[in-house]
């Protein structure tokens, strides 16, 4: 038999071993190629819009490459392990290592490059779909068209050739350093040496829980005021990151087996089939896979976290825009407001015009500050707030001596937590006016030009307002002192009004600060849409590669444990019993990293989500649910693989 | 009382065109409380016979009854149930689960059969004392010697008091001292517990511990020897002679 025939024969035999590797390969090529195609697509300029967007896409493609490369190298390692016996056999019949390497490389390259071609084809077709998704979420109104980009092809080919060389290199090392005897036993060598449980494990286990817990605790206090100054904040973040990651590692290294061991001790040697298949095997496996599982968990947490944050921004685009504009349209000069309302009248669009006079007054809120941090901040710098009269705010009546706040951003509310009621005072050079603070209004009163980006607006009784006007400190007053908002009565005409707004934009005075709700939320969606798209793409890639890695790991484990299934079936357990146990094992196997990842990302998102938007739960839960569903797919796949192994075990 | 009755057992592997008949009509009856050895050269079909008798492998044709139960009529799930209640196994390479401790391995059959924890503990205590496994009950299989492993395996086979225990080359991987210990143990258990043991072996010493030896050649029963009232020494010589005739080497006497 010539070497060529051997290669073909081998390939045929190994297709079954390879099929998932091939699928994973095709998938990653398709993903990479379609992403790079986007990068080179001329119409992308419209979606990415800016240099920043392009840089984002470019760095994302580098990251994508790293993920794919690590994944393929890892997958290759598992498969070369499966081929080890065959390699040993070749050596036994007298082939030298060079020849074996050639056989292996040719075999590998046939598989690799045909999957590459296939993947590029799929990537090309799906790039249109991906483009359409991108247009949809960034709100670009364009028909996605198909461009075959030579540059993208070149880049993909070069990148995957580099990966191939790396794979060949690792294979060469594998052949070189293993003796025939080792090759025959590679498959049989289990990764773990079963040892007795030592007190060290208990300590590691507790340390893991403690470390994760303290990371979580600090993360929740991060912006509560215990850490002031950028240096402290930075140190705290480093602490959180490292303690959670180390905690995760210890968790897999000790905590899981420690807890399972406790459960086992409690059974006093009397284990049911479910315990046998899940508990006993998990407690050793998790320990030896601790590093891998830590990486999977951490990066899962990272991608869930980033996805959640970008989705939070995207999801709250409209609310954020409302907070910034405080109306459908807003201006700061009367002339411009007139110009716009006149145009609206001509176009027959009914509207409601609001005018609010604004003065800036120093406020003393120390008595109602909730946290030390708030008090500290107040001491450090005087709090200058915009104040309006209750008469110019709809549906609000205030008695004399009463003050309300409105429209503080979530971020500001977190940094400056105030009680619901209490005494405050307005301080002017001439007099201090004591007031009763009676709570907060949900509505936004002034645009962000007035509120310094998120300060609350004080609302007072008309008489008080007039008093403040008399006493006002001229130094505190800025250019803007009147706020004009225009709300369109009929929501369906909002787009028409926005067109007029855009039409007029050049005629508005420069200092009039024209803002449009529609424009602002559109802008936000466009830029966040791109970020979300890139993060989503990377997150998906990571999800699928890490899912595949866990699945490969399970394939490996099932081969290792096949002998056990034989024993159990001989003793009298049915297939059904075994599969039930395996299901539980898979729930733990996939569930523990998933739940840990979800909880990490939950705490990460919760610690700083208010920088990104106004809604926490809905967008975060949507991301988490989707992630969980996709992830469980791999769990189901591995259960079905186990089924096959169990079927064959007797 | 006959506990196992096999009639004209045939077992063939392969397909229509490439058929290999391993068992060619074997008749066998095993009495309750018997200690039976099955001997034969490699490839004679003795392990296949054991697998078929113990319902791990299906027979091609023939009849097999264990405890008045027609084994050929049972479905796979029923067979599994039958195995867990009525059969015990000892294997050459121990077949212990290496992620479980000695105690957990031994208690496995009880947990499938649904014994209570208390009963299980009581059974374990008696048996572990008898087999000298008390001290190592919390060790993992890779921490104990081959002899201890095989004793663990034996304990697992005996603990649920099955009707028949099947042993496949139980001494194959043991040194002679450990092998002798195990065989003594098996014959003790056979006598004290009235346990029926069917052992496949090609080791004549091992076979001499049993009460009856059946010789298999080319898928058929060649002959059988009863120990009767002979000493083990005499029985061993008998076996050796038969073995010699069986392998076709003329014996000088």
Image: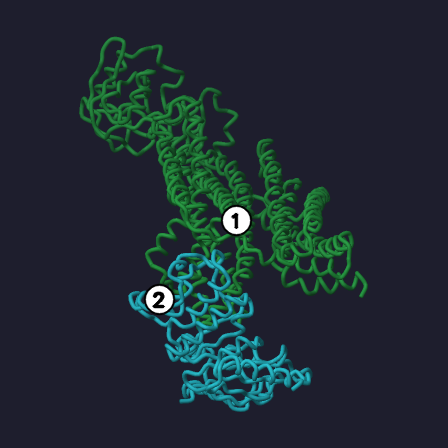
Chain colours: A green, B cyan
Chain ID at mark 1: A
For the point 22% across and 23% down, the residue is A461
**C-alpha distance separating marks 2 and 1:** 47 Å
Query: Which residue is identified by label 2?
Result: B124
From the top left corner, tell me how far across and down residue A527 is, in percent. Answer: 52, 36
Q: Residue at x 43, y 65 (%)?
A: A580
Q: Nearer the viewer, residue A335 or B41?
A: B41
In front: B221, or B234? B234
**Few, some or many C-alpha atoms within 10 Å of disc 1 (few <14, some 14-19, many ≥20)?**
many
Q: Quadrant of the N terminus of chain A?
A: bottom right
Whether residue A578 sits left or right of residue A119 in the image: it is left
Q: Is residue B218 visible?
A: no
Residues at discs 2 and 1 in contact (Cβ within 8 Å)? no
Q: Is residue A236 above or below residue B98?
A: above
Instruction: Give the side of residue B232 with respect to residue A175, left or right.
Output: left
Tell me residue B28's x, y (percent): 51, 88
- For disc 1, the marked residue is A543
Circle 2 crowding by C-alpha within 10 Å: few under 14, some 14–19, many from 20: many
Vertical comparison of A155 with B235: above or below? above
Return the residue nearer the eye: A170 or A453.
A170
């Amino acid at each position: 038999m010539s070497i060529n025939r051997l290669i073909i024969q081998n390939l045929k035999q190994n297709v079954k071993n390879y099929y998932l590797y091939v699928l994973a390969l095709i998938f990653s090529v398709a993903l990479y190629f379609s992403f790079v195609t986007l990068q080179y697509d001329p119409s992308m300029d419209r979606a990415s819009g800016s240099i920043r967007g392009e840089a984002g896409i470019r760095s994302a493609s580098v990251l994508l490459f790293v993920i794919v490369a690590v994944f393929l190298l890892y997958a290759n390692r598992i498969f070369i392990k499966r081929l080890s016996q065959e390699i040993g056999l070749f050596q036994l019949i007298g082939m030298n290592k060079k020849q074996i390497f050639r056989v292996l490389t040719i075999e590998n390259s046939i598989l690799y490059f045909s999957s590459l071609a296939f993947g590029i084809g799929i990537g090309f077709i799906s790039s249109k779909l991906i483009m359409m998704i991108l247009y949809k979420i960034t709100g670009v109104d364009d028909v996605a068209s198909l461009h075959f980009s030579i540059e993208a092809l070149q880049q993909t080919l070069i990148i995957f050739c580099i990966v191939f060389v790396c794979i060949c290199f690792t294979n060469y090392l594998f052949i070189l350093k293993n003796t025939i005897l080792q090759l025959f036993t590679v498959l049989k060598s289990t990764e773990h040496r079963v040892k007795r449980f030592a007190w060290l494990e208990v300590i590691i286990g507790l340390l893991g829980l403690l470390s994760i817990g303290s990371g979580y605790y600090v993360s929740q206090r991060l912006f509560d005021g215990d850490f002031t100054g950028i240096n402290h904040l930075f140190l705290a973040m480093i602490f959180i990151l490292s303690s959670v990651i180390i905690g995760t590692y210890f968790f897999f290294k000790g905590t899981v087996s420690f807890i399972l061991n406790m459960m086992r001790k409690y059974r006093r040697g009397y284990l049911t089939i479910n315990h046998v298949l899940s508990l006993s095997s998990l407690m050793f496996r998790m320990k030896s896979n601790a590093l891998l599982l830590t990486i999977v968990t951490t990066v899962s947490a990272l991608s869930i976290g980033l996805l959640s944050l970008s989705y939070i921004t995207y999801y709250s685009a409209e609310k954020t825009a409302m907070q910034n504009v405080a109306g459908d349209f807003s201006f700061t000069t009367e002339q411009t407001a007139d110009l716009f309302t006149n145009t609206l009248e001509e176009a027959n669009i009914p509207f409601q015009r609001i005018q609010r006079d604004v003065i800036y007054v120093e406020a003393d809120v120390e008595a109602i500050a909730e946290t030390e941090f708030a008090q500290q901040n107040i001491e450090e710098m005087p709090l200058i707030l915009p104040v309006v009269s209750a008469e110019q705010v709809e549906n609000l009546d205030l008695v004399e001596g009463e003050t309300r706040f409105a429209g503080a951003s979530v971020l500001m509310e977190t940094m400056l937590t105030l009680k619901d009621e209490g005494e405050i005072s307005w301080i002017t050079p001439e007099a201090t006016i004591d007031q009763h603070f009676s709570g907060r209004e949900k509505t936004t009163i002034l645009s962000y030009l007035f509120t310094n980006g998120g300060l609350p607006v004080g609302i007072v009784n008309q008489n008080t307002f007039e008093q403040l006007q008399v006493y006002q400190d001229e130094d505190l007053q800025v250019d803007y002192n009147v706020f004009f908002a225009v709300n369109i009565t009929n929501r369906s005409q909002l787009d028409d009004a926005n067109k007029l707004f855009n039409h007029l934009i050049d005629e508005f005075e420069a200092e009039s600060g024209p803002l449009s709700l529609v424009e602002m939320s559109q802008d936000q969606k466009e830029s966040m849409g791109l970020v979300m798209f890139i993060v989503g793409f990377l997150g998906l890639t990571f999800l699928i590669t890490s899912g595949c890695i866990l699945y490969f790991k399970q394939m490996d484990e099932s081969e290792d444990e096949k002998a056990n299934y034989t024993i159990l079936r001989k003793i009298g357990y049915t297939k059904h019993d075994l599969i039930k146990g395996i299901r539980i094992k898979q729930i733990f196997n996939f569930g523990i990293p998933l739940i840990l990842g979800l909880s990490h990302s939950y705490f990460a998102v919760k610690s700083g989500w208010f920088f990104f938007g106004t809604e926490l739960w809905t967008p975060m839960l949507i991301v988490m649910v989707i992630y969980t569903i996709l992830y469980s797919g791999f769990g189901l796949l591995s259960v079905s693989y186990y089924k096959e192994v169990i079927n064959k075990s007797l | 009382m006959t506990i196992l009755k096999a009639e004209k057992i045939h077992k063939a592997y392969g397909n229509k065109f490439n058929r290999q008949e391993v068992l060619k009509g074997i008749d066998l009856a095993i009495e309750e409380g018997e200690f039976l050895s099955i001997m034969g050269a490699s490839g004679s079909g003795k392990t296949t016979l054991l697998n078929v008798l113990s319902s791990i492998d299906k027979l091609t044709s023939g009849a097999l009854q264990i405890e008045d139960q027609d084994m050929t009529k049972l479905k796979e799930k029923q067979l599994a149930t039958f195995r867990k209640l009525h059969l015990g196994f000892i294997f050459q390479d121990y077949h212990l689960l290496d992620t479980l401790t000695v105690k957990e391995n031994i208690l496995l059959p009880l947990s499938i059969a649904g014994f209570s924890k208390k009963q299980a503990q009581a059974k374990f205590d008696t048996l572990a004392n008898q087999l000298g496994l008390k001290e190592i009950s919390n060790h993992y299989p890779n921490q104990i010697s081959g002899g201890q492993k095989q004793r663990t395996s034996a304990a697992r086979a005996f603990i649920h008091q099955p009707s028949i225990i099947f042993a496949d080359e139980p001494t194959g991987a043991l040194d002679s001292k450990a092998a002798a210990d195990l065989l003594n143990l098996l014959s003790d258990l056979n006598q004290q517990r009235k346990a029926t043991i069917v052992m496949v072996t090609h080791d004549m010493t091992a076979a001499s511990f049993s009460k009856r030896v059946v010789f298999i050649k080319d898928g058929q029963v060649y002959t059988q020897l009863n120990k009767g009232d002979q000493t083990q020494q005499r029985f061993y010589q008998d076996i050796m002679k038969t073995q010699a005739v069986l392998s076709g080497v003329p014996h000088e006497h």
